[in-house]
Image (tube, rainbow, N blue to C red):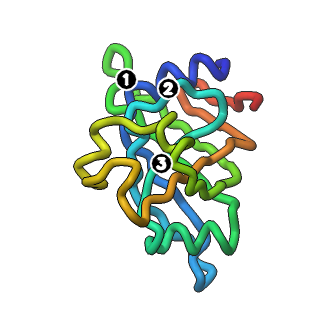
Amino acid sequence: MTLADVSKTMGDIDFAMLSTRAASGDISSRPMSNNGDVEYDGDSYFFTWEEAHTVGDIERDPKVGLSFSGSKGLLGKVPMFIAVEGKAELIRDKTAFQQHWTKDLDVWFKDGIDTPGVVMIKVHATRIHYWNGMEDGEVAV
């Protein structure tokens, strides 16, 4: 599979599990919506609150994992699974927010990109592994 193939599959998956290293050293995971921002080139974007544990986790250790699971497989087959390892960056620039903002986010952030305390998480993939039925492999990033 190519990065374009993975991107197409990710377009049908709204939520990913974002895993970080907690202050205790344990792995901490939480669901994050990609908000339909899936023109995937190796970077994923998510929005959260400044006070979220996720932000502190990333400040301590930017290495993160994302896991995606398709909801259906072709002709009743097992759906596709995608695991992304990457480095997270915290972005607080409203101009950058605009490039990845969708109206659906207004449910969580009532003043849009002007909502106080909003942070964008950019995850740059360093490794992508997929499982597609009986096939599995890695995609060059």
Around disc 3, counting alpha carbons within 10 Å, would you say few (fewer than 14), some (14 to 19), or many (20 or more)?
A: many
Residue 21 versus residue 46: which sits nearer the camera? 46
Left or right: residue 68 compared with residue 104 = right
Residue 8 versus residue 1: which sits nearer the camera? 8
For badge 2, the amino acid type reads: Gly
Q: Which residue is mark 1?
A: 73
Q: For the point 39% across and 64% down, which residue is it? A: 116
The nearer-to-camera label among 3 and 2 is 3
Q: For the point 57% across and 17% down, which residue is it? A: 5
Q: Quadrant of residue 127?
A: top right
* Discs 3, 1 touching: Cβ within 8 Å: no
Q: Identify the mark nearer the N-term, 3 or 2.
A: 3
Q: Which residue is mark 3?
A: 46
Q: Identify the mark nearer the N-term, 2 or 1.
A: 1
Q: Which residue is mark 2?
A: 133
Q: CA distance from mark 3 to mark 1?
A: 26 Å
Give residue 104's position: percent from left, percent from top: 28, 39
Q: For the point 43% across and 40% down, which residue is it? A: 34
* Discs 2, 1 touching: Cβ within 8 Å: yes
For badge 3, the amino acid type reads: Phe
